[in-house]
Image (spheres, grey):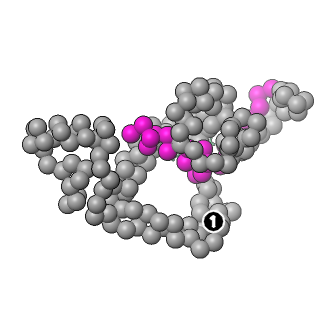
Amino acid sequence: MEFLDRFVKETQRMHSPSFQTARNARKDVVLPGGYLVPARAVVIPCFPSLHKNPAQWENPARFEPDRWADKAVAGKAMRNGLYTPFASGGRGCVGFNLALMEIKMVLAELVYHYRFEDASTEAVVYDPEFLVVRPLNFYATPTKRTEWPSASKGGTKKKEEEEVHGVEGGLDDASR
Ligand code: HEM
């Protein structure tokens, strides 16, 4: 579950479906670098630019779920607004907890039952007219799993418990 959490975080860093938000400046602000944002200006931060800023992320173009294992990395990203797939502040996403729960539940079920292979024949093109980021030509071939890798350490413990308590359906149960 820890890896799933990191995997989802990293997917949202690199391929967040949300692209930008918009906020109104309440008063004149001078940003680092000397940029004046006048009062009432609409500010539109671009999430991919924040999420892949080479000044803030190590190897930003690399898909690396384990970068989130470092609590300092995660803390800095949250504190400094470097990672905002659900925006933030008073108008941030109210459904983010539900969304994360749904994503993890569906992903775990899909990966448990199918093996996926990239079946795209060309570089992915994103829909320029859609509100959120949506690939137009991304294809994957699912193959139903008939065997599973051996259980991880945690999984073995669970299986042992299941055997002790007579519960059917461990990780090696191909009937699911
Ligand atoms: C991966 C899934 C989701 C992503 C990436 C996402 C992203 C966002 C973002 C970036 C905003 C801020 C928009 C802005 O400031 O302009 C937002 C707002 C919002 N989201 Fe989500 N969202 C997701 C799922 C959900 C779900 C599942 C719900 C409800 C069940 C939800 C409900 C809302 C609502 C009501 C707002 C408006 C909040 C406000 O304006 O006060 N979202 N979302």
Q: In screen coordinates, is 126 left or right of 142?
A: right
The span shown in magenta is: 1-27
Question: Which quarter is ligand 1 in?
Answer: top right
Q: Which percent across, then down, holds residue 109?
A: 34, 53
Kindly identify the residue that appears in the image at 62 percent across and 38 percent down.
84
- What residue did someone put label 1 on? 124
Secondary element under disc 1, as helix, strand or loop, is: loop
Q: Judge whether residue 106 can be spotted in this image.
A: no
Give the percent coordinates (x, y) of residue 148: 30, 56
Q: Residue 158 appears in which quarter of the rendering?
A: top left
Q: Which of 84 and 4 is in front in this view?
A: 4
The amino acid type of the residue labelled 1 equals Val
Q: Look at 47% across and 66% down and name the residue there.
A: 117
> Which residue occupies 51% across, 66% down?
118
Q: Position of residue 172 (x, y in %)?
A: 23, 53
Q: Where is residue 160 in the image (x, y as percent from the top left)?
A: 18, 39
* Vertical position of residue 119 compared to residue 41: above or below: below
